[in-house]
């Protein structure tokens, strides 16, 4: 057996999505979904997956198929348990619709929440232009009520900078309710930091406002005795979207890409990598 030469494989089980987020890197929306034979080949050749899309909860049947396929693999229990602990990256709006299946498999969700209503609804919208904040918060509420594991994945764009302090307070409130201590919240923030969209142009005024918002966050953290959170919020561990961090992305056709956002572009053929069975991907990536 030849394994994917990567600690984690991003499994893009569908390109379908029920939102039209303004900053989304997936420029090509389609109804394509991963086939079962593709799924089986990926699972047989890796130890850890991250499930994404599109919006993966639009293809809840495939997520169930992942669990079933893992159970049927002829592998050690240690490897099976590792595979079953995958995270599903979701926009959070379809949690209520799929709550029974989520509970059944004890799913682990990574929920996109960009902050308070005004910030979140700036970019994360339905095709009709309506904001998604209320539906996402309802999904988080259901996770709490049903003891479903989840984390938060916030995105910062320039038009959200004025709301950064208030958004931080909401994110902290949700995380404290879930995790129960400043130390655990700090660890989560350190490993899953707010991602700042780098393609945008930031003016001097944007930077000044960002610094002022961060100062308010620092003062607030100190005022509530949450010094442990400073490490998690202000000291980031990685950059996102623009660097290879040890994960490769596999789309619904078993084509591989160095990052998930490249696999969702209209010109994705430009970024497609050679067949994973015939090449050292780490060497290839380092020479691109």
Image (tube, grey):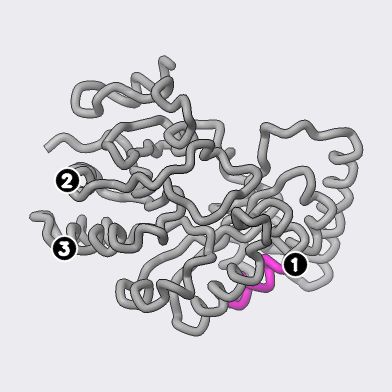
**Image coords of residue 161 (percent x, y):** 80, 49
Q: Which residue is mark 3?
A: 71
User: How far, Cα to Cα, is label 3 from label 2?
Assistant: 15 Å
Q: Say if the magenta span includes residue 34.
A: no
- Left or right of residue 152, residue 109 in this image: left
**Image coords of residue 157 (percent x, y):** 72, 45
Of all residues, the one furthest to the top in this rendering is: 287
Mark 3 nearby-residue class (10 Å; few <14, some 14–19, many ≥20): some
Name the secondary structure under disc 2: helix
Nearer to us of marks 3 and 1 is 3
Give the answer, above or below, for where 263 lies relative to 8.
above
Q: Main secondary structure of the magenta part?
A: helix
Name the secondary structure under disc 1: helix
- Left or right of residue 7, residue 118 in this image: right
Asked whether 217 or 147 is in front, the reply is 147
Of all residues, the one furthest to the left in this rendering is: 74
Q: Which residue is mark 1?
A: 169
What's drawn in magenta, residue-wise? 170-180
Asked whether 156 or 176 is in front, the reply is 156
- Left or right of residue 192, residue 182 in this image: right
Q: Dots 3 and 2: beta carbons under 8 Å? A: no
User: How far, Cα to Cα, is label 3 from label 1?
Assistant: 41 Å
Q: Which residue is mark 2?
A: 37
Q: Say if the magenta span includes residue 178.
A: yes
Residue at (24% x, 25% y) in the render = 275
Which of disc 2 and disc 3 is earlier in sequence? 2
Which of disc 1 and disc 3 is earlier in sequence? 3
């Amino acid at each position: 057996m030849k394994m994917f030469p990567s600690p984690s494989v991003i499994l893009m089980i569908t390109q379908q999505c029920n939102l039209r987020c303004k900053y989304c890197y997936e420029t090509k929306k389609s109804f394509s979904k991963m086939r079962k034979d593709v799924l089986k080949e990926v699972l047989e050749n890796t130890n850890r997956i991250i499930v994404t899309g599109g919006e993966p909860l639009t293809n809840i049947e495939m997520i169930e198929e992942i669990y079933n396929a893992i159970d049927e693999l002829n592998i050690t229990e240690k490897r099976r348990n590792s595979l079953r602990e995958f995270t599903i990256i979701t926009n959070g709006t379809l949690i209520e619709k799929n709550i029974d299946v989520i509970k059944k498999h004890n799913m682990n969700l990574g929920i996109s929440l960009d902050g308070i209503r005004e910030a979140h609804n700036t970019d994360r919208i339905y095709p009709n232009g309506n904001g998604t904040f209320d539906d996402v918060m309802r999904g988080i509420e259901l996770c709490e009520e049903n003891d479903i594991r989840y984390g938060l994945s916030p995105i910062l764009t320039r038009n959200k900078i004025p709301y950064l302090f208030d958004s931080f307070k909401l994110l902290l409130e949700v995380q404290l309710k879930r995790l129960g201590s400043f130390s655990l919240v700090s660890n989560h923030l350190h490993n899953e930091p707010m991602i700042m969209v780098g393609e945008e142009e930031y003016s001097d005024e944007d930077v000044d406002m960002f610094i002022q918002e961060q100062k308010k966050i620092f003062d607030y953290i100190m005022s509530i005795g949450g010094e442990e959170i400073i490490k998690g919020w202000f000291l980031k561990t990685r950059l996102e979207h623009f660097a290879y961090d040890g994960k490769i992305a596999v789309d619904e056709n078993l084509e591989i890409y160095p990052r998930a956002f490249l696999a969702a572009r209209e010109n994705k053929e430009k970024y497609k990598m050679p067949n994973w069975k015939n090449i050292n991907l780490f060497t290839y990536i380092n020479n691109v």
